[in-house]
Amino acid sequence: MWEGSDRRKFPRANYPCLVIIRKNHKEPEALLTHTENVGLGGICVILKKNLGLFMPVDLELDLMDTQPHIKCEGKIVWAVKRKETEEKKPSFFDTGIEFVRLSEDDRQRVALVVDRLEKLQSE
């Protein structure tokens, strides 16, 4: 179980990839954004609105690895409003989404991305 941003259970990699978020599979509106970072436990994204703590969502994640998009369920585990820089710009929220029911194959794909980026950053 995810325990908060200060006690991360899984390593994260800065990897800006495309994410489509729906509040549920019946919701026609999709939010298109990108990741701030990716880990085995979930992702951090920037959203224009706060979806609500513990809100279940459907995720579609493009790892840009020429393989099909990862599709799984997720749960909002934290959201922090960013400081507004200008009055006319909308507020943005850094949002942590925990993966729920991520298949083992998809978990391995995410692990490869995180491992590869950790090695590149340590060199």
Image: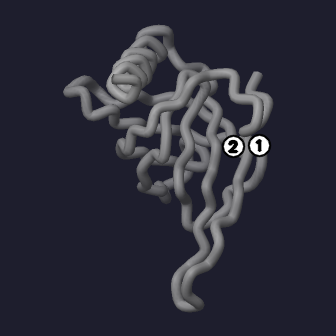
Out of 37 and 123, give the one closest to the viewer: 123
Q: Which quarter of the image is occupied by the C terminus? A: top left
Front-most of 66 and 12? 12
Report x, y in % for residue 106.
Answer: 43, 17
Amino acid type shown at disc 2: Ile
Disc 1 residue crowd, few under 14, some 14–19, many 20+, Cα 10 Å: some
Which residue position is annotated with label 2?
76
- Give how far across and how far down residue 99 sits, in percent: 60, 28
Q: Position of residue 9 (x, y in %)?
A: 69, 22
Q: Which residue is mark 1?
A: 54
Q: Residues within 10 Å of mark 2 (few under 14, many from 20)?
A: many
Q: Residue at x 57, y 24 (%)?
A: 11
Give the vertical position of 2 relative to 14 (above or below).
above
State yes or no: discs 2 and 1 in contact (Cβ < 8 Å): yes
Quarter of the picture holding the N terminus: top right
Image spot of residue 16 (x, y percent): 38, 44
User: The residue under label 1 is which amino acid type?
Assistant: Phe
